[in-house]
Image (cartoon, rainbow, N blue to C red):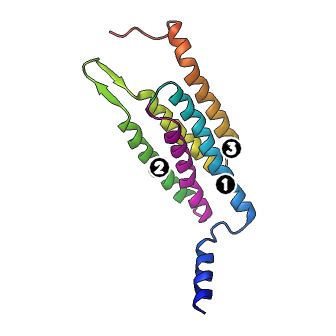
Amino acid sequence: MAWQTITSTVASEFSDLADLEQLTRTVLRLVLAALLGGCLGWQRERDGQEAGIRTHMLVAASSALFLLVPQQMGMGDDGTSRVLQGLLAGVGFICAGSILKVPEAQRVHGLTTAAGIWMTAAIGVAAGLGREMTAVFSTLLVLAIFLLEKPLNRMGARRPRP
């Protein structure tokens, strides 16, 4: 009798993905978010930036998860909006921590990293909300921006620093 109670309790606790369709949807959205974040992180890591593959993957996947769970719970648009607001505030806090002012060089360091992390969170949000093509297109756009940065700087598009 005790084992039956234990097994039924454990089964009920793991019943949030009750059918194959819901399991597939959840796995697809989380994995897609992580992979897209990983693409951005790989590019940043390749350029020697501090926030690399793991950071971007975690930001994207966690952003997706923060929206998947309220959807699974049947939360309405108002509740989802509040979750999204909290998520953006938290990611903004992480981004702010990546920005450093270097007084000796009279410059700010980390703005691109912060913007990249912010965009990675947005891509995770898109994936978490089931907007997979929007997430993929956004990732390609950000990769293009990252990849074009150096060639554009070499062509003289950047203002000289004082």
The residue depicted at 64 percent of the width and 71 percent of the height is: 15
Q: Which residue is mark 1?
A: 27
Q: Earlier in the sequence, mark 3 or mark 2?
A: 2
Q: SS for tag 2?
A: helix
- C-beta proximity under 8 Å, tags 3 and 2: no
Task: Please tell me whether residue 161 is drawn above or below residue 108 in the rendered image.
Answer: above
The residue depicted at 64 percent of the width and 48 percent of the height is: 31
Local crowd size for mark 1, using a 10 Å CA cut-off: few (<14), some (14–19), many (≥20): few
Local crowd size for mark 3, using a 10 Å CA cut-off: few (<14), some (14–19), many (≥20): some
Q: SS for tag 1?
A: helix
Q: Between 77 and 6, which is closer to the camera in this rendering?
A: 6
Q: Which residue is mark 2?
A: 87
Q: Residue furthest bottom?
A: 1
Task: Please tell me whether residue 28 is drawn above or below residue 158 in the rendered image.
Answer: below
Q: CA distance from mark 3 to mark 2?
A: 19 Å
Q: In terms of secondary structure, what is the magenta stretch mainly?
A: helix
Q: Is residue 79 left or right of residue 106?
A: right
Q: SS for tag 3?
A: helix
The residue depicted at 50 percent of the width and 12 percent of the height is: 153
What amino acid type should be assigned to the residue bearing mark 2? Leu
Return the x and y of residue 56 as percentages of the image width and height. 52, 39
The segment highlighted magenta reads: 50-75
Q: Which residue is mark 3?
A: 132
Local crowd size for mark 2, using a 10 Å CA cut-off: few (<14), some (14–19), many (≥20): some
- C-beta proximity under 8 Å, tags 3 and 1: no
Return the x and y of residue 109 as percentages of the image width and height. 37, 25
- Inspect the magenta stretch and tell me whether residue 53 lies in it: yes
